[in-house]
Image: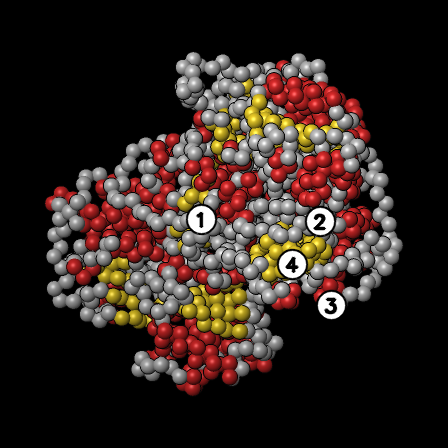
């Protein structure tokens, strides 16, 4: 039985592009055909709900549940409904969606057709990161091919359902990955997050019911429809269902991406699949799901990578693509680098994020460059607490920004103290990771 | 009303409020920046954090933003919890990272909301050691300074300017901690409501430029409640004075009229009070034409002698107060009195008063305008003739978005949510005008045509409302049908028209539509605009003479003396006739504020007080009588016009002159009988026992400010005419909200302190007296329906002229007489303009920016105008901006290209 529903075709193509022909030959678009011609939209929603598919963008919200919030039939009122794929993959260290889109674009297209059908959206967008030229071109060709066959557009598969699918290239800001900021950007407005409520399924793009799902999430939909909820549930190890594309970057022997059962342990991912640490380097810590997740350390290696276990350990699975910090890297410099990124990417709407993050970066820069003073750590912690507590800021950008900092202060506090006491950074090899800092 | 628990104390709060509004309404200080009572919440600044508890057992709670959390029965919150207090202090600390320490040189200092909130949160010491961010500022025109370094990024400016006022040239630019609020390039802010940025900005990014030129701290200003003289809307203002100069105009909250906002004419148009052209002394015109200053007693004696020995006529003015007009009428007698309107305007004012007062329902307040669910603008370009009304209509257009918010469970104060959900959905607004208006963007449909045609289309709308049919071309039909359907299906439809087109048929058409809607058992409102601050008052203080008959009496010698009250007659009649009449008169007594052409021919000139230097009352478009109070004692021999006139006509003890005038007026003119209710505020019979100080309790320098004249501290003048004192002593606490000379409350030095005067944050003023309205007899106008559609509006133009037919056009900057004497207004007004159809422009060989002069016809020849070619202008018609000279509507005029005209290097889009 197929254990890699997301990547099996890519692997068969030796990591090359899965063509329309080979996608179809492998049973492609059968799921969409089945959903549109044999199932009611509510049945599709239910099957995805039963499969316990959870959002792969980071938050892990149950996908079927999100779909079920969309008003159906007359309750939706007059006008469009929108299905939006969040392909604005800008999380540092994360490149899983890019892999799927560049290599197997038809999988996402098929997933989008089914998802749009499930919520009866007549307009579908793939909001893609501006720098993902190759993926955008691949998707555009895939959509053209699918449209030619009548899989996208009017009366898909001869059914009564019609859907437009458009690739929208982002102007480029990290915040566009926040679903409501994404919707504002899609509408041509400033990419600032919106207040919730109203939630997008009630009032999203152009004030109409809208669902926003991550690329990997959508890519899971065709196999759920094809093989059923139970089959999908059985793919995962432990509490979460399906497979997950895990990734590792940093000084490991074989950095990369692997589709593995949801709940594979961190140790297996790093040691077996990524080939362990490079010679001469030891693991100090890792960010399990991208830059906006808390550091974990060696004691967490045997945790299964799923939503619940990682959260219980004080971090988040996030995108599931981890960044390894080895013992040659200065944790202060890394924290500073990350704060620089998040401060740069603040949309500028709310005060704690806009003003607080640059201050944190400045404090970290002082410490890293030997100008730190006693009291700086308390200042960092106090600010981090007020900036990072969910609800204190308008959206979760700052919360994510604070996660690596507070955890670095927790696990690598001695490094921070040493910087302040000695008035310099003792890591000589941290140069490549040093922030521009300006 | 739900009960909520704030710091273990139970409070009853208004249903539907957010927590911030609820706290402020119950007198609990909670700091905030981005929330504004008129603009709602967006949750940007995070300053109003409170701790919300799940239930009685929850001791930790979590931080929520007051402005983003709805009240609900039994909700438990804490404002004083350590966590909330510390978080709020942190927010201020973050805002202060980049805010410069320039309070001593900042115009906002002393009335800065940021200062107030900083003190309120207790943030006192600086922990950030880095550099502060800096920006380049922009030139934004004659009204507004820009100092971006002070910005705390609360987003209020763009939310006000773009979202609330419909401006398009101020943006939120940049991102992260380099957000920039400005234009894409330096230049004049286009919106005629730009001045409100000064009050909306919680700190000193946008400040009042003319005020900066001669700056005074708020605490050093002397103020009194006043009324804007810019148009007939009657916005409430708070003028501030120091050293005998009127320094600035601030908004004064009035729930029913202007709420928090003024137009730029109102805010920046009072510079004439300090102008070099100001008349400060009485004077005689000598034989050689020079002007000889005489003292006050001499002037009064001479005036008395003139009145005693000659046959008089008096000419009043729609820009003078009720008191002044009535005093003059009482002096000369009704038979010899002319109300001061042009002969074209006078009957329209009468008609409009009759239509808007006499049909059982008063014209709506602006607050009510904002609640309408369909609007028809018939002929009136309100952005230029009643600007504050235009701003209200923008809010009206959003009512549908508020209706949409309910089913989506979005609270109405959640501004971004309401707007985002509604997208571009707008309440129907239809507009028929001569030229495109600045409300086009909120109009469902609009049409540009001639006044006669506007009336005709209006009557067609009536026909459709009554279920009859009309025949029109496609575009007109779409407009007429759309408007009729929108008005019919609305529950509070509003019809707006006015006297500005000087066209009786337009007013009739507007009234007909309202009557037709009434027949459908709706609650229609009819709002008719008037030209000047006291047009309604002057219209009600009737005189037997029309302007022409008054002038004729002078020309033919049947009277030899004219007393002209605050009126430049050259704006009211043809210049030859005025010139002839004034030279024929043996005595012309002119009372006015600034120099004008009429005063040039006056034999005795008496310096009249401006609105800031005297008391008086004016009656606005609704028929609402409003009192403006003396802000300061004028220099020189300036006196209220009514005091000059009454000073010689009454055996007065001086103390009760005004009170007597009002009571006499109330007896003589039944429609004004209720004006005596205004009078109860006066003198010792006022509502407050102790006088209300005009000066703040921090007013500085009173022992020194006159030291250049005398080292002795001058005795404080007694003010017997009002409840106010010219001092800093008195009962400054617990004033009735409508009598607050300026707003201030402990800990609230900025204008945001107005909330402390309101019964509910954003609601009615505490202790305010009931508004006083004129009473009006039943209508005498018969709305006849005869002729092709209706008799009065045939859709045809007056026939038989040569050249082009003149249509009046208005400009917010320049059309108003007094404000046009203010240099900033002149800068915005530019040159007198003429709008032409492209065909007519081609025939005259001119393009936009060229000059045309009037060669022959029914207006004074010789004047040149700047051409503005507009396809919306009907062929054969010209739109002439009202203001500079007398321009009769419907007149036929011939124009010739002005070969000597110097084109401006760049024609800037003007107001």
* Residue at mark 3: B474
* Label 1 SS: loop
Q: Are marks 3 and 2 on the same chain?
A: yes
Can you give x and y, in whole percent of width and height, for residue B551 in the image?
74, 38
Assess disc 2: are there few (<14), some (14-19) or many (≥20) residues with their C-alpha within 10 Å of its C-alpha.
Answer: many
* Residue at mark 2: B888
Which of B447/B814 is in front?
A: B814
Mark 3 to mark 1: distance in Å?
43 Å
* Residue at mark 1: B140
Which of B505/B390 is in front?
A: B505
Can you give x and y, in whole percent of width and height, for residue A388 in the image?
35, 47
Mark 4 to mark 3: distance in Å?
34 Å
Q: Are marks 2 and 1 in contact (CB under 8 Å)?
A: no
Q: Nearer the viewer, mark 1 or mark 4?
A: 4
Can you give x and y, in whole percent of width and height, for residue B501 in the image?
71, 50
* Label 2 SS: loop
Indicate left or right for A60 with B316 as reference: left
Location of residue A416 with respect to A135 vertically, above or below = above
Q: Chain of mark 4?
A: B
Q: Chain of mark 1?
A: B
Q: Nearer the viewer, mark 3 or mark 2?
A: 2
Location of residue B366 with respect to A108 vertically, above or below = above
Which of the two labelled residues, at mark 1 and mark 4, occupies the earlier sequence position? 1
Location of residue A258 with respect to B150 vertically, above or below = below
Give the residue drawn at x 43%, y 13%: B712
Give the residue drawn at x 55%, y 51%: B831
Q: Are marks 1 and 4 in contact (CB under 8 Å)?
A: no
Which of the two labelled residues, at mark 3 and mark 1, occupies the earlier sequence position? 1
* Residue at mark 4: B895
Assess disc 1: are there few (<14), some (14-19) or many (≥20) residues with their C-alpha within 10 Å of its C-alpha.
Answer: many
Which of A54/A139 is in front?
A: A139
């Amino acid at each position: 039985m197929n254990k890699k529903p997301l990547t099996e075709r890519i692997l068969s193509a030796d990591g090359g592009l899965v063509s329309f022909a080979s996608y179809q030959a492998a049973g492609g678009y059968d799921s969409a055909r089945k959903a549109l011609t044999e199932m009611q939209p509510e049945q599709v929603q239910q099957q995805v709900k039963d499969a316990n598919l959870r959002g792969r963008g980071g938050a892990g919200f149950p996908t079927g549940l999100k779909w079920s919030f969309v008003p159906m039939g007359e309750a939706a009122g007059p006008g469009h409904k929108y299905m939006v794929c969040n392909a604005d993959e800008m999380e540092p260290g994360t490149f899983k969606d890019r892999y799927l889109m560049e290599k197997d674009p038809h999988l996402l297209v098929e997933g989008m057709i089914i998802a749009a059908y499930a919520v009866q959206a007549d307009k579908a967008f793939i909001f893609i990161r501006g720098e993902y030229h190759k993926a955008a071109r691949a998707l555009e060709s895939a959509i053209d091919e699918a449209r030619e066959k009548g899989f996208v557009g009017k009366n898909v598969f001869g059914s009564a359902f019609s859907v437009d699918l458009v690739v929208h290239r982002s102007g480029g800001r990290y915040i566009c990955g926040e679903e409501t900021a994404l919707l504002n950007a899609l509408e041509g407005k400033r990419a600032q997050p919106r207040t919730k409520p109203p939630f997008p399924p009630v009032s999203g793009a152009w004030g109409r019911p809208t669902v926003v799902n991550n690329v990997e999430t959508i890519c899971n939909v065709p196999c759920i429809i094809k093989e059923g909820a139970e089959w999908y549930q059985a793919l995962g190890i432990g509490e979460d269902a399906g497979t997950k594309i895990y990734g590792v970057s940093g000084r490991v022997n074989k950095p990369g991406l692997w589709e593995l059962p949801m709940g594979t342990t961190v140790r297996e991912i790093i040691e077996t699949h990524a080939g362990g640490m490079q010679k001469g380097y030891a693991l100090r810590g890792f960010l399990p799901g991208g830059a906006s997740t808390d550091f974990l350390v060696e004691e967490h290696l045997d945790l299964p990578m799923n939503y619940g276990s990682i959260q219980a350990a004080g971090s988040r699975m996030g995108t599931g693509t981890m960044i390894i910090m080895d013992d040659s890297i200065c944790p202060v410099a890394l924290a500073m680098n990350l704060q620089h990124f998040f401060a740069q990417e603040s949309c500028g709407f709310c005060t704690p994020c806009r003003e607080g993050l640059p201050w944190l970066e400045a404090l970290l820069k002082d410490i890293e460059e030997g100008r730190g003073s006693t009291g700086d750590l308390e200042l960092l912690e106090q600010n981090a607490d007020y900036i990072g507590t969910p609800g204190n800021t308008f959206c979760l950008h700052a919360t994510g920004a604070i996660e690596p900092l507070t955890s670095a202060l927790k696990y690598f506090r001695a490094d921070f103290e040493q910087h302040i006491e000695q008035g310099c950074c003792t890591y000589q090899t941290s140069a490549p990771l040093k922030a521009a800092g300006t | 009303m739900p009960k909520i628990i704030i710091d273990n104390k139970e409070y009853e709060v208004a249903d539907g409020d957010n927590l911030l509004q609820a706290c402020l309404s119950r007198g609990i200080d909670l700091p905030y920046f981005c929330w504004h009572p008129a603009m709602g919440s967006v949750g940007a600044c995070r300053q109003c954090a409170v701790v919300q508890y799940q239930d009685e057992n929850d001791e930790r709670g979590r931080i929520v933003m007051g402005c983003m959390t709805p009240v609900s029965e039994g909700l438990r919150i804490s404002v004083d919890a350590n966590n909330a207090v510390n978080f709020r202090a942190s927010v201020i600390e973050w805002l202060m990272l980049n805010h410069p320490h320039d309070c001593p040189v900042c115009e906002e200092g002393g009335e800065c909301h940021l200062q107030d909130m900083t003190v309120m949160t207790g943030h006192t010491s600086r922990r950030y050691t880095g550099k502060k961010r800096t920006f380049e500022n922009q030139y934004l025109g004659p009204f507004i300074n820009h100092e971006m370094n002070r910005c705390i990024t609360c987003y209020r400016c763009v939310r006000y300017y773009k979202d609330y006022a419909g401006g398009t040239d101020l943006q939120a630019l940049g991102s992260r901690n380099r957000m920039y609020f400005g234009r894409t390039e330096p230049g004049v802010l286009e919106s005629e409501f730009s001045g409100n940025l000064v009050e909306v900005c919680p700190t000193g990014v946008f400040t009042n430029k003319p005020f900066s030129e001669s700056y005074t701290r708020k605490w050093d200003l002397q103020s009194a409640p006043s009324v804007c003289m810019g148009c007939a809307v009657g916005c409430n203002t708070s003028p501030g004075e120091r050293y005998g100069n009127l320094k600035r105009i601030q908004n004064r909250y009035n729930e029913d009229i202007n709420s928090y906002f003024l137009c730029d004419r109102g805010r920046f148009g009072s510079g004439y009070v300090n102008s070099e052209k100001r008349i400060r002394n009485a004077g005689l015109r000598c034989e050689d034409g020079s002007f000889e200053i005489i003292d006050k007693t001499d002037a009064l004696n001479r005036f008395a002698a003139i009145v005693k020995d000659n046959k008089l006529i008096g000419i009043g003015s729609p820009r003078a107060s009720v008191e002044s007009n009535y005093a003059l009428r009482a002096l000369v007698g009704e038979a010899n009195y002319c109300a001061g309107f042009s002969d074209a305007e006078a009957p329209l004012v009468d008609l409009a008063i009759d239509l808007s007062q006499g049909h059982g329902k008063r014209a709506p307040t602006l607050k009510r305008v904002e609640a309408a669910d369909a609007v028809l603008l018939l002929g009136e370009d309100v952005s230029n003739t009643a600007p504050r009304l235009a701003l209200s209509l923008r809010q009206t257009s959003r009512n549908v978005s508020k209706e949409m918010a309910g089913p989506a469970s979005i609270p109405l104060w959640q501004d971004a949510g309401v707007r985002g959900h509604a997208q571009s959905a707008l309440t129907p607004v239809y507009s028929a005008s001569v030229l495109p208006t600045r409300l086009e963007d909120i109009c469902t449909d609009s049409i540009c045509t001639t006044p006669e045609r506007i009336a005709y289309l209006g009557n067609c709308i009536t026909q459709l409302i009554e279920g009859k049919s009309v025949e029109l071309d496609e575009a007109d039909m779409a407009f007429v049908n759309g408007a009729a359907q929108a008005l019919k299906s609305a529950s509070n439809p509003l019809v707006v028209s006015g006297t500005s087109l000087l066209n009786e048929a337009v007013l009739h058409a507007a009234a007909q539509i309202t009557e037709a809607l009434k027949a459908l058992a709706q609650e229609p409102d009819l709002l008719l605009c008037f030209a000047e601050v006291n047009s309604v008052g002057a219209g009600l203080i009737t005189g037997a003479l029309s302007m022409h008959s008054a002038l004729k009496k002078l020309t033919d010698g049947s009277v030899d003396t004219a007393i002209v009250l605050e009126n430049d007659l050259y704006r009211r009649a043809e210049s030859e006739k005025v010139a002839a009449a004034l030279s024929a008169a043996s005595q012309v007594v002119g009372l006015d504020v600034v120099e004008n052409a009429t005063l040039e021919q006056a034999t005795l000139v008496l310096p009249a007080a401006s609105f800031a230097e005297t008391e008086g009352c004016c009656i606005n478009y609704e028929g609402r009588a409003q009192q403006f109070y003396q802000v300061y004692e004028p220099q020189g021999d300036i006196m209220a016009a009514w005091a000059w006139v009454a000073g010689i006509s009454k055996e007065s003890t001086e103390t009760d002159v005004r009170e007597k005038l009002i009571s006499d007026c109330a007896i003589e003119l039944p429609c004004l009988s209720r004006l005596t209710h205004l009078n109860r505020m006066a003198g010792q019979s006022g509502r407050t026992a102790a006088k209300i100080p005009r000066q703040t309790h921090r007013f500085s320098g009173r022992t020194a400010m006159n030291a250049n004249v005398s080292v002795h501290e001058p005795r404080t003048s007694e003010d017997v005419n009002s409840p106010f004192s010219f001092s800093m002593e008195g009962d400054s606490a617990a004033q009735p909200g409508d009598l607050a000379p300026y707003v201030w409350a402990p800990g609230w030095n900025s204008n945001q302190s107005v909330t402390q005067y309101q019964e509910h944050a954003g609601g009615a003023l505490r202790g305010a007296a009931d508004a006083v309205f004129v009473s009006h007899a039943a209508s005498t106008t018969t709305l006849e329906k005869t002729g092709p559609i209706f008799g009065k509006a045939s859709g045809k133009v007056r026939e038989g002229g040569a050249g082009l037919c003149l249509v009046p056009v208005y400009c917010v900057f320049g059309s108003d007489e007094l404000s046009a004497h203010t240099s900033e207004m002149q800068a915005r007004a530019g040159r007198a303009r003429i709008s032409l159809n492209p065909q007519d422009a081609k025939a005259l060989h001119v393009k936009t920016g060229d000059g045309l002069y009037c060669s022959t016809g029914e207006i004074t020849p010789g004047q040149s105008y700047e051409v503005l070619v507009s396809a919306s202008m009907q062929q054969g018609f010209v739109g002439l901006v009202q203001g500079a000279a007398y321009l009769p509507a419907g007149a036929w005029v011939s124009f010739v290209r002005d070969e000597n005209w110097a084109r401006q290097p760049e024609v800037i889009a003007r107001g």
